[in-house]
Image: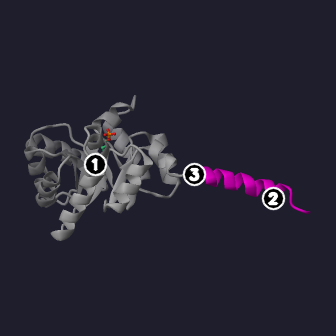
Amino acid sequence: MKFFIDTANMEEIKDAFALGVVAGVTTNPSLVAKEKNVSFEDRLREITSLVPGSVSAEVIALDAEGMIKEGKELASIAPNITIKVPMTPDGLKAVHAFSKEGIKTNVTLIFSANQALLAARAGATYVSPFVGRLDDIGHNGSDLISTIAEMFAVHNIETEIIAASIRHPQHVTDAALRGAHIATIPYKVLMQLFNHPLTDKGIAAFLEDWKNRDK
Ligand code: E4P
């Protein structure tokens, strides 16, 4: 499973990429709205000048025609822009149109296996099931990852599964074990993945022993 970073913040993106473990970026309108004094297009230019992998940029229009127009404009910013489209009938019409033009797509707000299958059949490059938001309403978001992964394997579907709405490190482990190709994770969760008290304790003990060695 690969890691994407789920943010529109340049400092977080720079820090995350410096770690060498991140392959792409996902944004959504809520994440972009947190960024002040920069247009969406300029932020996408900044991100794509740093990140060679997939950078998801979400359309705002709700009708297929509007999504296609917006998506084409966003896709013209850089070749690695992936157009993020909501899981609706109009969204899938737009995905179908993008796929015919070779524009990559990420179908977002997936909450059921059937939605994922529809998106894949429309030609989606990625589907994004929202693990945390399902957990929030008392469902098991990680079970959905397993179901989609099994369904795609049975039918040889090449659409990749991005585990989204990741809230904590256990979601990351679960996504990897249950067959997600990618987990898109907030910067805070990415940094939490590094932590283990025995690592800190071990470093402190090594340094102490080194300091006290016979010279
Ligand atoms: C990414 O594609 C999603 O938009 C994001 O992971 C949603 O996360 P949230 O449910 O924490 O807002």
| Label 2 SS | helix
Q: Is 65 a magenta residue?
A: no
Q: Quadrant of ligand 1?
A: top left
Question: Going by the image, does 212 lie left or right of 1?
Answer: right
Quadrant of residue 70 within the rendered picture: top left
The reply to whether residue 154 is in sight is yes
Towards the viewer: 81 or 127: 127
Question: Going by the image, does 203 lie left or right of 56?
Answer: right
Verify CB contact (< 8 Å) between mark 3 and mark 1: no
Where residue 190 sits: x, y (%)?
47, 48
Residue drawn at x 33%, y 55% as measured from the top left: 54
Residue drawn at x 47%, y 42% as measured from the top left: 188
Towards the viewer: 47 or 125: 125
As measured in the structure, the alpha-carbon distance from the residue carrying label 2 to the one carrying label 3 is 22 Å
Question: Going by the image, does 17 lie left or right of 105?
Answer: right
Image quarter where the N terminus lies is: bottom left
Q: Which mark is residue 210?
A: 2
| Label 1 SS | helix
Q: Amino acid at mark 2?
A: Trp
Residue carrying label 1? 141
The reply to whether residue 4 is in sight is no
Q: Amino acid at mark 1?
A: Gly
